[in-house]
Image (spheres, grey):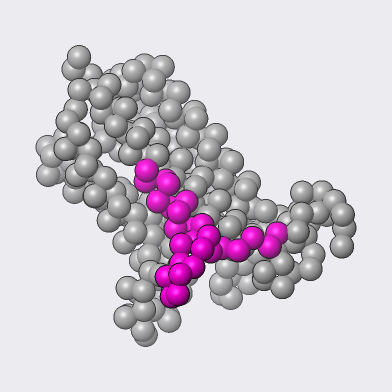
């Protein structure tokens, strides 16, 4: 084996007691919500908003992410199987979540939240965009710990050999590429929010998030192995095809936001 590559044989389980196991993916998934809550709490404090409203928003977000991500995987990647076995859709613990489905779930969850709370949709989704980018980082590191969703063979010195999957050649660690991209997007959005203390042009954060996240996803997909059999021979895979509408919507939203120049007004 090439001494310059990285042999990767991490156990996806942190520990196990009988049939109960704590996995790295679950811990990192939960960390996305935990750190997201901490950041949103600081934002709510800056805008003199009650903690109870944030707690309700967190519940809406959790439902939107899990339901959206699960349905996205079932309907986008394996519709034949899950439509024939609908009971399997509920078995989230068997794995299978799609980030594009999570994106749709978040957009819908925030819509329901603002209707209930009588708040502005763009105001809410702008702030959620910040923590969504951070959550994406944690999820991709979780994929790395699971030795899943990695890239094609590479000769680069940082290639990972995913030993648990029986690999014996280095592959692109696309989980790290994508995770770092999302982390940088989070830093950008977070700084944009605090540079104006929340009184930025409404719609710029969510539109930039949609553009940057899915552009990064689109190009990194070229380095990934096919996730499902029907992607073989496709010029663009399912992940890329699903990213295009988000990128277009983000560009339109950004243009509309800059044109209107409507700023959020924070009550001090």
In the rendered image, is residue 107 in sight? yes
Q: Furthest residue to the front?
A: 17
Q: Is-magenta flag for residue 177?
A: no
Q: Relative to residue 41, is residue 36 drawn left or right?
A: right
Residue 173, given in percent of the width and then of the height, sits at: 67, 53
Q: Residue furthest bottom?
A: 84
Q: Between residues 64 and 51, which one lies in front from this camera angle?
A: 51
Q: Relative to 120, say whether 99 is above or below.
A: below
- Relative height, residue 210 to residue 96 (above, below): above
Q: Which residues are magenta?
A: 8-34
Query: Residue 84, relative to residue 240: is it above or below?
Result: below
Q: Position of residue 176 (x, y in %)?
A: 62, 48
- In percent of width and height, residue 38 lies at 35, 35
Q: Residue at x 40, y 39 (%)?
A: 35
At x 24% / y 49%, what residue is drawn?
A: 59
Residue 28 falls within the magenta-colored stretch: yes
């Amino acid at each position: 084996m090439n001494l310059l590559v990285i042999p990767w044989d991490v156990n996806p389980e942190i520990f196990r007691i009988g049939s109960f196991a704590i996995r790295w993916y679950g811990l990192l998934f939960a960390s996305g919500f935990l750190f997201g809550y901490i950041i949103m709490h600081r934002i709510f404090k800056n805008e003199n908003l009650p903690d109870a409203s944030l707690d309700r928003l967190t519940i809406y977000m959790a439902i939107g992410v899990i339901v959206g991500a699960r349905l996205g995987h079932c309907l986008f990647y394996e519709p034949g199987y899950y439509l024939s076995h609908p009971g399997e859709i509920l078995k989230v613990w068997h794995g299978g979540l799609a980030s594009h489905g999570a994106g749709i779930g978040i957009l819908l969850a925030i819509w329901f939240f603002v209707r209930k709370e009588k708040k502005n949709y763009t105001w809410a989704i702008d702030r959620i965009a910040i923590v969504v980018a951070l959550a994406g980082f944690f999820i991709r590191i979780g994929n790395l710990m699971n030795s899943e969703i990695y890239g094609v063979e590479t000769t680069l010195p940082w290639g990972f050999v995913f030993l648990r999957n029986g690999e014996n050649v280095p592959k692109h660690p696309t989980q790290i590429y994508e995770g770092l991209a999302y982390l940088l997007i989070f830093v950008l959005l977070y700084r944009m929010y605090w540079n104006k203390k929340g009184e930025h042009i409404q719609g710029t954060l969510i539109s930039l998030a949609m553009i940057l996240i899915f552009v990064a996803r689109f190009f990194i997909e070229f380095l990934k192995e096919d996730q499902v059999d029907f992607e073989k021979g496709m010029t663009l895979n399912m992940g890329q095809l699903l990213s295009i509408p988000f990128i277009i919507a983000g560009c339109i939203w950004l243009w509309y936001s800059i044109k209107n120049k409507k700023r959020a007004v924070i009550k001090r």
